[in-house]
Amino acid sequence: VGLLKWLTLSLFAYVLVVLVVGVEWRAVLAGLWPSLPAGSATVVVAILGTTISPYLFFWQSAQELEEMNLSHAAPLARRPRGAGPVLQRLAVDSAAGFLVTMLVSLSIIAATAATLHNSGNGAGSTGIATAADAAAALRPIAGDFAFALFALGIIGTGLLAVPVLAGSAAYALAELMGWRAGLELKPREAMGFYGVIALAIGTALLLDLAGIDAMQALLLTAVVNGLVAGPVMLAIMLLASRSSVMGHFRVRGVGGVLGWGAVVLMLGASAGLLLG
């Protein structure tokens, strides 16, 4: 976890790219309220799927549980009076992560608009099939420095995402199957858990060697994430709203309004794609 925390600094490479390529900030501000042409439902669901991905629910909860087990702390349900500092830490952690996510996402979108889709300078390119193509497209527009920054961001993001994605799948399947799970365990103590991680990474390597269009695969994956996230969020909110499940920590007030609003947004976007 400590290593992954420091790897998140690589995400700010995308912010630096935006500063280097010379983005027209007036156009960015004007485009904050997007126009949605016909047939854009797929892209909307994909963007939501990359922001609210189902694997995040499993990863964060599993990590919190592991840290609680390692520190031998009693569950919050058994000590609700002392839960204040813990809940405050979780709120600050989630809010800070949300703000960083939005900053990086907007930087990636702005950098893409200023480079890959920039028809004004005649150097824009939309024929991007690999991460290497995306990095190389920056070189004639913003120079070697931006190229190096973008490449650094891609490498850092990959090192950050691979263990999280594979680990989240392993946590989810292990919980479903009742296996022992946790990165603090030795491989022989959780063979099913580590087997899923190895299988996920091995499958990804095979897909890469098969020459599949990485960008199309990413788009399809994001759409699937967006479609799956709605039902998962609905289940989470139903459980989180029940006193029989959450006790003193039942979701209510502003948290409940925001949570149900997010559920409606995700389900509405999915319905628009499936029924449109």
Image: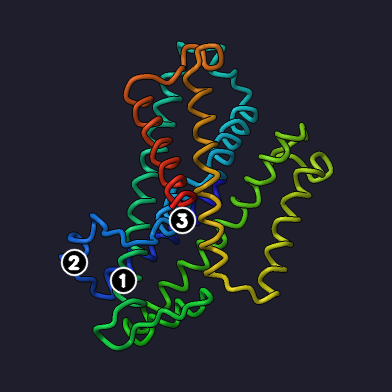
Callout 1: SS: helix
The image quarter in which residue 23 lies: bottom left
Q: Is residue 87 left or right of residue 205?
A: left
Label 3: state its secondary structure.
Answer: helix
Earlier in the chain: of badge 3 and badge 1, it is 3
Q: Nearer the viewer, residue 197 or 118?
A: 118
Contact flag, marks 1 and 2 (Cβ < 8 Å): yes
Give the residue at mark 1. 113
| x and y percentages locating residue 207 in the rendered image | 68, 68
Labels in figure, total: 3
Residue reaching furthest front? Answer: 275
Q: Are marks 3 and 1 in contact (CB under 8 Å)?
A: no
Spatial separation of the CA atoms under disc 1 and disc 2: 10 Å
Identity, as a three-letter code, of the amino acid under mark 1:
Ala
Position in image of residue 7 (x %, y %): 50, 56
The mark closer to the camera, 3 or 1, is 3
Dot 3 alpha-carbon crowd within 10 angstroms: few under 14, some 14 to 19, many 20 or more: many
Mark 3–mark 1 distance (CA, rounded to whole Å): 17 Å
The front one of 124 and 230 is 230
Residue at numbered disc 2:
27
The three-letter amino acid code for the residue at tag 3 is Ala
Label 2 environment density (alpha carbons within 10 Å; few <14, some 14–19, many ≥20): few
Q: Earlier in the sequence, mark 1 or mark 2?
A: 2
Q: Residue at x 46, y 46 (%)?
A: 270
Give me the C-alpha separation between circle 2 and circle 3. Answer: 23 Å
Quadrant of the image occupied by residue 178: top right
Q: Amino acid at mark 2?
A: Ala
Measured along the vertical axis of the image, is residue 53 above or below residue 21? Answer: above
In the rendered image, which residue does mark 3 sit on? 46
Q: Secondary structure at mark 2?
A: helix
Q: Residue at x 45, y 77 (%)?
A: 135
